[in-house]
Image (cartoon, helix red, strand yellow):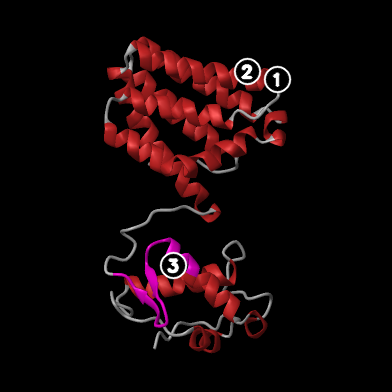
Amino acid sequence: MLGLTPDLNPERNGAAGADLPRPLGLGGELAQRLLAAIREGALSPGDKLPTEKQLSERHGVSRAVVREAIARLKSEGYVASRQGAGAFVVARPGQTSFRMTPDDLRHAFELRGAMEVTVAELAAKRRRPQDLAAIRSAFAAMQGALSQEKDGAAADDAFHAAIAAATGNPLIQRFVDFLAHQFSETRQLTWAPDSRQAGKAGAAQAEHQALLAALEAGDPAAAARAARAHVAGAAARFGLSEPED
């Protein structure tokens, strides 16, 4: 028995469910409470989750909400289904999967900052002529997208991938590739038509230019500063304050 409270029925909680943050929705809130039960040991590796019917009745939500919550936990590597037996907590909860959701945007920018500053610094130290050629090519593609008022998100991804390759560290390259589609979502925001019209893509390109200049100069400190300014600028363009030190 989970004993998760308060009741998740918005009608009984009033005002569209005061206990439920709107961005998460009912499914997200239930998933978070089940996750808390796993992290706190109320549900241990190997334990079977209550059935859809039990969770639905216990928390006053529909089975569709329960299915959404369980699906989130599966995608995040906390539970797995066994055909005909139900859903169970996995042996190493949360250690076999990594994903981000729109709710994680602020955290995604903080992770980008932590990664991209270090990557830029290493790339400035180790870049070879062929690395600079790839970085310049991606930069030129973004410049072309700007001048033609087109989407440059793919070139933006290629720019950052080329910087990761310039580190010469295959694990960094693989990790950046692994997270590329996650970080790409934040870059797609920059290159959306309304963002381009508002000058956000142009501002990002100016930051890219500063980073490229630091890499060409082989200046690790300048590259780190440029990368930090780029991520902070990207976060600010979408109303997110720079993470605290």
- Mark before the other along the chain sequence, 3 or 2: 3
| Quadrant in which residue 215 is drawn | top left
Please indicate whether residue 230 sits to the left or right of residue 13 in the image: left
Give the residue number, with chain letter if any, for mark 3: 73
Q: Residues within 10 Å of mark 1 (few under 14, many from 20)?
A: few
Q: Please give the name of the residue rendered at 28% of the width and 32% of the height, measured from the top-left corner.
A: 170
- Asked if 65 appears above or below 57 in the picture, the reply is above
Crowd class of label 3 (few under 14; some 14 to 19; many from 20; radius 10 Å): many
User: What is the x, y in percent for residue 226?
Assistant: 43, 23
Q: Residue at x 31, y 70 (%)?
A: 90
Residue 144, numbered label:
2
Task: Write down the quadrant of residue 130 in the picture.
Answer: top left
Answer whether labels 1 and 2 touch (C-beta < 8 Å). Answer: yes
Label 2 Cα neighbours within 10 Å, binned few <14 / some 14-19 / many ≥20:
some
Q: Which residue is mark 1?
A: 148
Magenta stretch in the rendered image: 71-90
* Residue 33 falls left or right of residue 188: left
Secondary structure under the numbered disc 3 in the rendered image:
helix
Q: CA distance from mark 1 to mark 2?
A: 6 Å
